Image (spheres, helix red, strand yellow):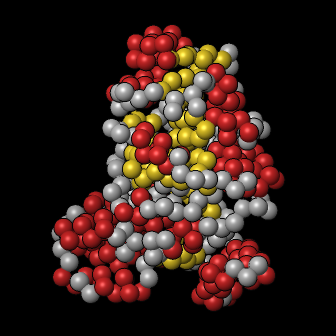
């Protein structure tokens, strides 16, 4: 199977250059075509792209030079029209590759009814950036298990997915054409979600190939999020009635449960039995124990608190602050906000402390409560008991007179 790698780029030549060198280094012996779609760059990209591409990939390289920046969707669609591969691999120019990245993707794409696959994407620090897109109980978007250690087993299990990121997405060319390509009404956002939901709505399966590993240096293009409001409105008009929350279904694969925090943000927790087993050893935990245990189980809330306390007792307040910041990515809770706020002030990090305070205040509580009540009633009407239970727990734990959580 010939794979056409389509890489949209706009300026940031050194980023594109690194991506191409990495692709060439880790694709030896693979049957690939490489198409870089230059969206009207004004830096060295314009002159340097073709010579480097031909040096690395020979006649299997194409520099597609567009006269102006047409955005991700139009650029990728133009690249697809120039492709001759049986499958198209759309990949951002801020991606770097690792040995053996392609065979797991090819294997996953050969499975019955699978029409689109993606690799596991890690941040440069080795933590998870993307192993599938999730829709929370409040219909917000997130990357499943973002921030988990990159070697965590949950990242490589098969989860039911409605969408994958377009930062690295492989699908047959015929499937892409039948779907109409990326919807060109979007501008640098939501194009990938729209395409994936289009495929999913027609019965296609989407799969993350966890043994395919790429590093994502994430959203370096200037203006990447400038059209988020308009993109979100278009996405909602096309798919708002068809999307179903699925984070609780995906998390259940790994034995985790979904909760809503006091401000309505979604988080995952351990079931009581797993929590109790970890807490039993917490009293004698050392710093080294804590680091190891939290790599094995990053959703252990008490472990983050205990590790931060140990570091503070040793006078390592900067490390303790870092630990609490990492914990706040998993737990939008006063148990983390309060010590993080205090420690940020003590360390002179006033901007961080103010950010934590804003997060803890959240949105208008009456508005949030009305929204959750509406979703609860809808879940009950549709007989979605697990989803209804998530809303009901929040409504019981946060009565109207309780007010907002404070840092």
Q: Nearer the viewer, residue 301 or 103?
A: 103
The structure residue drawn at horizontal position 51% and vertical position 74%, both measured from the top left corner, is 252
State how many labels appear: 0
Please name whichever residue, 132 or 377, is drawn nearer the observer in this view of the structure.
132
Tell me if 75 is positioned left or right of 32 in this view.
right
Name of the residue lying farthest toward the right: 237
- Residue 185 coordinates in the image, percent (x, y): 77, 38
Residue shown at 65% from the left, 18% from the top: 66
Expressed as whole percent of the image width and height from the top left, the position of residue 23 reads 41, 29
Say whether residue 385 is visible. Answer: yes
Q: Nearer the viewer, residue 217 or 121?
A: 121
Q: Name the residue located 23 percent from the left edge and 83 percent from the top edge.
A: 281
Relative to 288, is 275 above or below? Answer: below
Left/right placement of residue 71 relative to residue 101 reads right
Q: Position of residue 200 (x, y in %)?
A: 68, 54
Q: Position of residue 296 (x, y in %)?
A: 31, 68
Q: Is residue 351 left or right of residue 133?
A: left
Q: Is residue 346 among what the camera can see?
A: no
| Rendering quarter of residue 337 | bottom left
> Which one is in front, 100 or 279?
100
What residue is rendered at 64% in x and 28% in y? 80
| 298 w.r.t. 381: above or below | above
């Amino acid at each position: 199977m010939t794979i056409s790698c389509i890489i949209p780029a706009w300026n940031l030549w050194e980023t594109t250059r690194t991506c191409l060198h990495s692709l060439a280094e880790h694709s030896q012996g693979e049957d690939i075509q490489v198409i870089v779609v230059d969206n009207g760059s004004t830096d060295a990209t314009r002159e340097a792209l073709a010579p480097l591409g031909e040096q690395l990939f020979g006649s299997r390289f194409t520099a597609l030079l567009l006269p102006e920046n047409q955005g991700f969707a139009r650029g990728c669609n133009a690249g697809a029209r120039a492709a001759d591969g049986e499958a198209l691999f759309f990949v951002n120019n801020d991606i770097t590759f690792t040995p053996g990245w392609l065979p797991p993707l090819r294997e996953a794409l050969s499975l019955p009814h699978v029409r689109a696959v993606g690799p596991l994407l890690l941040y440069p620090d080795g933590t998870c950036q993307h192993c599938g897109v999730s829709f929370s109980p409040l219909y917000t978007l997130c990357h499943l298990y973002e921030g988990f250690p990159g070697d965590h087993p949950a990242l490589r299990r098969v989860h039911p997915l409605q969408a994958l990121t377009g930062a690295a997405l492989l699908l047959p060319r015929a499937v892409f054409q039948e779907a109409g390509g990326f919807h060109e009404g979007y501008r640098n956002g939501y194009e990938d979600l729209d395409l994936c939901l289009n495929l999913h709505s027609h019965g296609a399966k989407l799969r993350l190939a966890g043994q395919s590993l790429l590093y994502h240096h994430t959203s370096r293009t200037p203006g990447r999020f400038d059209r988020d409001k308009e993109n979100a409105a278009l996405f909602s008009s096309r798919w708002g009635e068809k999307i179903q929350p699925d984070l609780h279904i995906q998390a259940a694969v790994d034995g985790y449960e979904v909760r809503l925090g006091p401000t309505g943000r979604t988080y995952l927790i351990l079931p009581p039995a797993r929590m109790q087993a970890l807490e039993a050893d917490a009293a004698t935990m050392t710093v080294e124990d804590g680091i190891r245990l939290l790599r094995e189980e990053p959703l252990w809330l008490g472990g983050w608190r205990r590790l931060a306390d140990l570091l503070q007792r040793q006078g390592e307040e900067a490390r303790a602050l870092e630990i609490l910041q990492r914990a706040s990515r998993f737990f939008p809770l006063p148990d983390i906000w309060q010590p993080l706020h205090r420690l940020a002030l003590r360390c002179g990090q006033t901007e961080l402390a103010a950010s934590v305070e804003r997060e803890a205040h959240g949105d208008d509580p009456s508005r949030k409560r009305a929204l959750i009540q509406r979703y609860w009633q809808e879940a009950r009407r549709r007989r979605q008991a697990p989803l209804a239970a998530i809303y009901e727990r929040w409504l019981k734990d946060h009565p109207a007179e309780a007010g907002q959580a404070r840092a």
